[in-house]
Image (cartoon, rainbow, N blue to C red):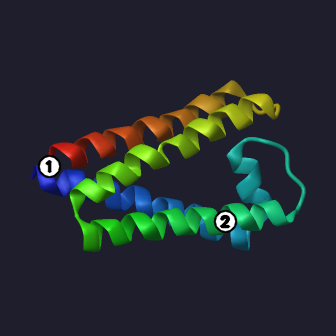
Protein backbone atom coordinates (compact mmCIF):
# COMPACT_ATOMS: atom_id res chain seq x y z
CA UNK A 1 0.00 0.00 0.00
CA UNK A 2 2.86 2.37 0.83
CA UNK A 3 4.29 1.92 -2.68
CA UNK A 4 0.92 2.75 -4.24
CA UNK A 5 0.75 6.03 -2.29
CA UNK A 6 4.42 6.85 -2.90
CA UNK A 7 4.39 6.20 -6.64
CA UNK A 8 0.83 7.46 -7.05
CA UNK A 9 1.72 10.85 -5.57
CA UNK A 10 4.88 11.15 -7.67
CA UNK A 11 3.04 10.20 -10.86
CA UNK A 12 0.14 12.55 -10.07
CA UNK A 13 2.55 15.46 -9.52
CA UNK A 14 4.38 14.72 -12.77
CA UNK A 15 1.16 14.41 -14.78
CA UNK A 16 -0.25 17.56 -13.19
CA UNK A 17 2.79 19.64 -14.15
CA UNK A 18 2.51 18.33 -17.72
CA UNK A 19 -1.14 19.48 -17.68
CA UNK A 20 -0.11 22.92 -16.45
CA UNK A 21 2.51 23.14 -19.19
CA UNK A 22 0.01 22.18 -21.89
CA UNK A 23 -2.41 24.77 -20.51
CA UNK A 24 0.27 27.46 -20.76
CA UNK A 25 0.79 26.52 -24.40
CA UNK A 26 -2.89 26.28 -25.35
CA UNK A 27 -4.52 28.84 -23.01
CA UNK A 28 -1.70 31.17 -21.95
CA UNK A 29 -3.73 34.05 -20.51
CA UNK A 30 -6.02 32.00 -18.23
CA UNK A 31 -3.04 29.89 -17.17
CA UNK A 32 -1.04 33.00 -16.31
CA UNK A 33 -3.97 34.39 -14.35
CA UNK A 34 -4.07 31.18 -12.33
CA UNK A 35 -0.34 31.50 -11.70
CA UNK A 36 -1.04 34.61 -9.67
CA UNK A 37 0.52 37.56 -11.45
CA UNK A 38 -0.86 39.84 -14.15
CA UNK A 39 0.19 38.85 -17.63
CA UNK A 40 -0.04 39.84 -21.24
CA UNK A 41 0.49 37.34 -24.05
CA UNK A 42 4.21 36.82 -24.45
CA UNK A 43 6.77 34.25 -25.38
CA UNK A 44 7.41 33.76 -21.66
CA UNK A 45 4.13 31.93 -21.30
CA UNK A 46 5.15 29.43 -23.98
CA UNK A 47 8.57 29.03 -22.38
CA UNK A 48 6.90 28.28 -19.05
CA UNK A 49 4.65 25.74 -20.76
CA UNK A 50 7.57 23.91 -22.33
CA UNK A 51 9.49 24.02 -19.03
CA UNK A 52 6.60 22.49 -17.11
CA UNK A 53 5.96 19.77 -19.70
CA UNK A 54 9.66 18.88 -19.66
CA UNK A 55 9.77 18.61 -15.87
CA UNK A 56 6.71 16.37 -15.82
CA UNK A 57 7.96 14.06 -18.57
CA UNK A 58 11.41 13.88 -16.97
CA UNK A 59 9.87 12.95 -13.61
CA UNK A 60 7.82 10.19 -15.25
CA UNK A 61 10.88 8.93 -17.15
CA UNK A 62 12.93 8.77 -13.97
CA UNK A 63 10.22 6.79 -12.23
CA UNK A 64 9.90 4.40 -15.16
CA UNK A 65 13.55 3.91 -16.07
CA UNK A 66 15.87 5.03 -13.27
CA UNK A 67 14.02 4.09 -10.09
CA UNK A 68 12.80 5.68 -6.92
CA UNK A 69 16.10 7.19 -5.74
CA UNK A 70 16.66 9.13 -8.96
CA UNK A 71 13.03 10.27 -8.85
CA UNK A 72 13.45 11.27 -5.19
CA UNK A 73 16.47 13.45 -5.96
CA UNK A 74 14.62 14.96 -8.90
CA UNK A 75 11.62 15.83 -6.70
CA UNK A 76 13.90 17.31 -4.05
CA UNK A 77 15.62 19.56 -6.58
CA UNK A 78 12.51 20.44 -8.57
CA UNK A 79 10.81 21.67 -5.36
CA UNK A 80 12.92 24.80 -5.89
CA UNK A 81 10.64 25.76 -8.79
CA UNK A 82 7.42 26.27 -6.77
CA UNK A 83 9.46 27.90 -3.99
CA UNK A 84 10.80 30.35 -6.56
CA UNK A 85 7.29 30.79 -7.96
CA UNK A 86 6.15 31.75 -4.44
CA UNK A 87 8.67 34.57 -4.37
CA UNK A 88 7.83 35.65 -7.93
CA UNK A 89 4.14 35.96 -7.08
CA UNK A 90 4.86 37.89 -3.87
CA UNK A 91 7.28 40.27 -5.61
CA UNK A 92 5.10 40.57 -8.73
CA UNK A 93 2.04 41.93 -6.98
CA UNK A 94 0.15 38.68 -6.60
CA UNK A 95 -1.79 37.78 -3.50
CA UNK A 96 -0.32 36.04 -0.49
CA UNK A 97 -3.15 33.50 -0.78
CA UNK A 98 -1.98 32.52 -4.26
CA UNK A 99 1.69 32.58 -3.34
CA UNK A 100 1.29 30.37 -0.30
CA UNK A 101 -1.93 28.51 -1.11
CA UNK A 102 -0.79 27.37 -4.55
CA UNK A 103 2.95 27.67 -4.99
CA UNK A 104 4.30 27.14 -1.47
CA UNK A 105 1.77 24.35 -0.86
CA UNK A 106 2.93 22.70 -4.07
CA UNK A 107 6.54 22.87 -2.89
CA UNK A 108 5.53 21.16 0.36
CA UNK A 109 3.70 18.37 -1.48
CA UNK A 110 6.67 17.87 -3.83
CA UNK A 111 9.00 17.64 -0.80
CA UNK A 112 6.66 15.09 0.79
CA UNK A 113 6.79 13.10 -2.43
CA UNK A 114 10.60 13.25 -2.36
CA UNK A 115 10.66 12.05 1.26
CA UNK A 116 8.33 9.16 0.46
CA UNK A 117 10.45 8.15 -2.50
CA UNK A 118 13.62 8.28 -0.39
CA UNK A 119 12.06 6.00 2.24
CA UNK A 120 10.77 3.50 -0.32
The foreground one among 1 and 119 is 119
Q: Compare marks 2 and 1 and give the one earlier in the sequence.
A: 2
Q: Residue furthest top?
A: 96
Residue 114: image x %, image y %?
32, 45
**Residue 35 or 47: which is nearer the viewer?**
47
Q: CA distance from mark 2 to mark 1?
A: 31 Å
On the picture, is 35 further left or further right than 81?
right
Q: Which residue is mark 1?
A: 120
Question: Residue 31: image x %, image y %?
Answer: 71, 57
Of badges 2 and 1, nearer the viewer stands 1
Residue 101 lies, with reference to residue 52, above or below; the image says above
Q: Residues within 10 Å of mark 2 (few under 14, many from 20)?
A: many
Residue at 43%, 35% in the rendered image: 108
**Side of 62 where 5 appears, left or right:** left
Horizontal and vertical percent position of residue 115: 27, 40
Which circle marks residue 49 in the picture? 2
* Residue name at image x 14 percent, y 49 percent: 120
The residue positioned 69% from the left and 49% from the top of the image is 34
In-image side of 67 versus 22 (left or right): left
Whole-percent x, y for residue 93 in the image: 82, 31
Q: CB atoms at circles 2 and 1 under 8 Å apart?
A: no
Task: Indicate which disc residue 88 carries.
Answer: none
| Vertical placement of residue 68 versus 66, above or below | above
Furthest residue toward right: 40
Alpha-carbon neighbours of circle 1 within 10 Å: few (<14), some, or many (≥20)? Answer: few
- Give the image quarter of residue 102: top right
Q: Residue at x 29, y 66 (%)?
A: 63
Residue nearer the viewer, 114 or 5 = 114
Q: Secondary structure at mark 1?
A: loop
The quadrant holding residue 111 is top left
Badge 2 marks a residue whose secondary structure is helix
Amino acid sequence: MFDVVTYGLAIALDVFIVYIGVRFLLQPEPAASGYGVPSRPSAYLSVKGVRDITYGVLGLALLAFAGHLAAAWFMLVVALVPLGDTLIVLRGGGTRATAFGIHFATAVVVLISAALLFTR
